[in-house]
Image (cartoon, rainbow, N blue to C red):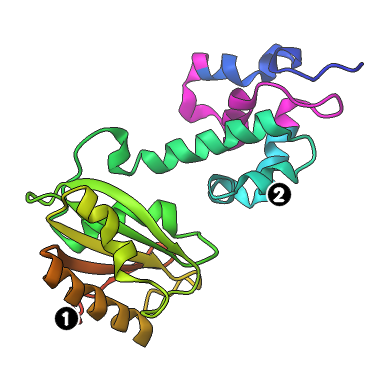
Amino acid sequence: MEKELRIMDLPESERPREKLLKYGAESLSNGELIAIILRTGSCNENILNLSNRILRETGGLNGLLTSCSEDFLNLKGIGAAKASQLLALAEISKRFKSFRSGEQYKITQPKDAAELIMESMRHLKQEHLKVIMLNTKNIVISVKDVSVGSLNSSIVHPREVFCEAIKKSSASIIITHNHPSGDPLPSSEDIALTNRIKECGKLLGIELLDHIIIGNGVYVSLKEKGIL
């Protein structure tokens, strides 16, 4: 049985780990950094070649960080173990920009809410609706996925939006969803949904502070637009 080609099987001058320790992480290419994480190639491909091919076939670092398990498993030379390592890397990169790092996250303006969920939502291929739950000091308590698929006021029921907010004793909420097209311009359905959730919030005593629509690196706040 042929063995996998490890980093240690490379010539010393080509070993990313030694290069990192000697010259610093910033001296390594994206492929070399991925190689350090994956550690082994396949019996037919060394780890550097494999890592660079993964980057090419997923569309670069941004593509790699937004790929799913199925995307990785479809790549030659990638099994469950390596797919899991890459998925963990992608999740860490998302958490780095979110309150889930363990620190309190306070929202004082629409930009704060957009930055909280931008990296996890900007590349999604379907529409996702999330609810950001806040306490009386506008500190994030939790973020909950509510719906996946086409959003409109008849499909997304207010009880789904407010169920978790009630459990968490939220003082207020912000709803947010993405437009897979990359254009965050609100539709008539987006506005209708916002108004319905706002009215239900008044009855429950949980204020809807904003509805943030996420595009590809850009967002629209219905509060800023004067719609909410």
Q: Find the distance from the CA under tag 2 to the CA under tag 1.
A: 43 Å
Q: Residue furthest bottom?
A: 188
The amino acid on which the numbered mark 1 sits, given as a three-letter code, is: Gly
Q: Is residue 132 above or below residue 18?
A: below
Residue 135 x/y as whole percent: 12, 49
Give residue 206's position: percent from left, percent from top: 14, 62
Q: Which residue is mark 2?
A: 57
Q: Position of residue 106 (x, y in %)?
A: 16, 47
Look at the image and say whether residue 193 sits in the magenta stretch.
Answer: no
Magenta residues, start to end = 21-49
Residue 104 is marked as none
* Residue at 44 percent of width and 36 percent of height: 92
The nearer-to-camera label among 2 and 1 is 1
Residue 43, located in which quarter of the rendered image?
top right
Assess whether residue 33 is covered by the magenta stretch: yes
Residue 187 visible here = no
Query: On the picture, is 125 further left or further right than 2?
Result: left
Q: Residue at x 29, y 69 (%)?
A: 158
Mark drawn on residue 226: 1
| In the image, residue 54 above or below residue 150 | above
Image quarter (top left, top right, bottom left or bottom right) of the N terminus: top right
The residue closer to the viewer here, 2 or 164, is 164
- Position of 152 compared to 180: left or right? left
The residue lying toward the viewer, choosing from 73 and 170, is 170
Estimate the x, y position of residue 32 in percent, counting from the top left: 61, 29
